[in-house]
């Protein structure tokens, strides 16, 4: 059997959906700060009576802030050739998908998954009391699979969820998943945190997932995973499943990343991620033995970008970073994630090994350097006519999900009817070399065109170098 990784969003047309009523006297709360968990509240039930206590108080506190999100898109019609009837025009078809969302600001700011709203022409949010509101998108962030929506509440304050501090979360903690599975209406399931800091599940570029065995099914995407204090631990996003239904292995985006995306959406209308400036590889068991490290954990630095936190902290190639501001760094994904949950300009502390000795150093996070200022459309009698390119920089690479230390020019757009499209170029291709000479920026690229002759062009696509003979 093949195990499938599925986003937990329901697709297809829906019938009438039942949702519960909003709780009376629900007090709204602003979700602007991280709330620490009470460690002393973790106890094993001493008696049978304690063991059958209800989750109802937690549900009453949290459920009013969980909503249903309906996304409608239009599948464009096409012309098809029928062997009996000739040319037939297949009309446009409306498609509707449904997921869940969480109110995180009492003025109607809602967070959900990007895959719930992606491609939608119309969005409708349904509250727990059945009221429906049209919603607009403030920010979509495919890199984290999060989207931030806004509804007009006409001044009414809505119930919200506070963000939990998942740094204090532990495997075995009880959690509840609240959402709208299969469109049946708001549903609550219970479970525990099965694992923390899952970075190797391949769901998003910034992976650091909370794993839970609380039942998550299609339609739960964008819903809440809450702790026993009724605080938002994470946004339910995906499941591992052989059948397409819950198999007890679900994943949620932690509250720290959700908060970072929401704060960016509300304050600036975009998400600006911080980074350390470190390029590196995950420490394997062989690397740990070779470098005499206590365990195979951390990031071996292979490159450092100038004027970044790592450079100013004095880190060097060959150092092994094992923690960032007190949180363990297990691999390259966790280092990238931990930096991205903080704001540019924030002070951090690196813990690292150098020469077998553990050391610390301080730095200040920055946003990735660069912009799309030199983006250029390519025209002319060559194989590149009809595409746009821009010089790769850390900022551009971060936007496109490319290695932030990669050099070259990247294709940002390809006209579908152009020569470039017929030549096989795709958005995200990185032009590395022309006739064996490195391409460093847009001007350098343009300088290598215009001969009218054929030449060898090497591009990078999905980590693989491809060389072809094209007209320059």
Image (cartoon, rainbow, N blue to C red):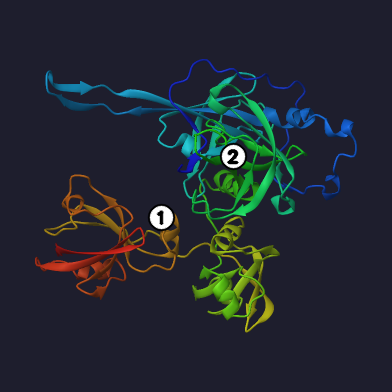
Which residue position is annotated with label 1?
400
Which quadrant of the figure has residue 236? top right
Indicate which disc, 1 or 2, sits on the residue closer to the N terminus: 2
Mark 1 against mark 2, which lies toward the viewer? 2
Is residue 167 positioned above or below 289 on the image?
above
Relative depth, front residue between 397 and 195: 195
Element carrying mark 2: strand
Residue at the outermost front position: 1
Horizontal arrangement in the rendering, residue 465 relative to residue 420 (left or right): right
Q: Position of residue 280 (x, y in %)?
A: 51, 70
Q: Closest to the observer: 86 or 155? A: 86
Judged left or right of residue 61, residue 276 is: left
Expressed as whole percent of the image width and height from the top left, the position of residue 403 reads 43, 63
Tell me: residue 374, above or below residue 147: below
Tell me the crowding category of disc 2: few under 14, some 14 to 19, or many 20 or more residues within 10 angstroms, Cα based: many
Circle 1 sits in a helix, a strand or a loop, which is it?
helix
Determine the image quadrant of residue 67.
top right
Label 1 with label 2: CB-CB less than 8 Å: no
**What residue do we see at 9% from left, 65% from top?**
452
Q: Is residue 120 left or right of residue 333?
A: left
């Amino acid at each position: 059997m093949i195990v499938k990784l599925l986003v937990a969003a329901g697709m297809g047309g829906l019938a009438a959906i039942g949702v519960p009523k909003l709780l009376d006297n629900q007090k709204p709360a602003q979700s602007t700060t991280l709330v620490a968990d009470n460690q002393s509240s973790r106890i094993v039930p001493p008696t049978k009576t304690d063991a059958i206590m209800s989750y109802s108080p937690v549900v009453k506190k949290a459920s009013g802030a969980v909503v249903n999100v309906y996304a409608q898109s239009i599948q464009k019609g096409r012309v098809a050739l029928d062997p009996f009837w000739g040319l037939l025009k297949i009309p446009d078809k409306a498609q509707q998908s449904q997921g869940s969302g969480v109110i995180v600001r009492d003025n109607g700011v809602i967070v959900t998954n990007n895959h719930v709203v992606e491609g939608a022409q119309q969005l409708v949010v349904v509250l727990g009391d059945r009221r429906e509101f049209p919603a607009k998108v403030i920010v979509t962030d495919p890199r984290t699979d999060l989207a931030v929506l806004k509804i007009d509440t006409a001044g009414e304050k809505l119930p919200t969820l506070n963000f939990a501090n998942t740094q204090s979360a532990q495997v075995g903690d009880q959690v509840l998943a609240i959402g709208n599975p299969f469109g049946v209406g708001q549903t609550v399931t219970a479970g525990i945190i099965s694992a923390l800091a899952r970075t190797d599940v391949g769901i998003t570029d910034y992976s650091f997932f909370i794993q839970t065995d609380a039942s998550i099914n299609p339609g739960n995407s964008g819903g809440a995973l809450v702790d026993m204090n009724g605080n938002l631990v994470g946004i339910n996003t995906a499941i591992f499943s052989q059948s397409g239904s819950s198999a007890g292995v679900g994943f949620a985006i932690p509250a720290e990343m959700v908060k970072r995306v929401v704060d960016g959406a509300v304050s600036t209308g975009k998400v600006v991620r911080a980074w350390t400036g470190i390029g590196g590889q995950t420490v394997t068991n062989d690397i740990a033995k070779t470098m005499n490290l206590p365990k195979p954990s951390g990031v071996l630095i292979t490159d450092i970008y100038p004027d970044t936190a790592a450079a100013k902290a004095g880190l060097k190639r060959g150092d092994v970073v094992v923690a960032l501001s007190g949180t363990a760094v297990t691999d390259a994904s966790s280092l990238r994630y931990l930096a991205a949950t903080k704001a540019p300009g924030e002070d951090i502390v690196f813990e690292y090994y150098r020469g077998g000795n553990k050391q610390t150093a301080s730095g200040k996070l920055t946003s990735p350097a660069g912009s799309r200022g030199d983006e250029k459309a390519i025209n002319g009698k060559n194989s590149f006519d009809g595409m746009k390119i821009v010089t790769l920089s850390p900022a551009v690479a971060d936007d496109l999900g490319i290695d932030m230390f990669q050099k070259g020019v990247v294709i940002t757009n390809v006209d579908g009817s152009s020569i470039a499209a017929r030549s096989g170029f795709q958005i995200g291709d990185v032009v590395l070399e022309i006739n064996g000479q490195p391409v460093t920026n847009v001007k350098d690229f343009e300088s290598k065109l215009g001969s009218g002759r054929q030449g060898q062009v090497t591009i990078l696509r999905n980590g693989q170098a491809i060389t072809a003979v094209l007209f320059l």
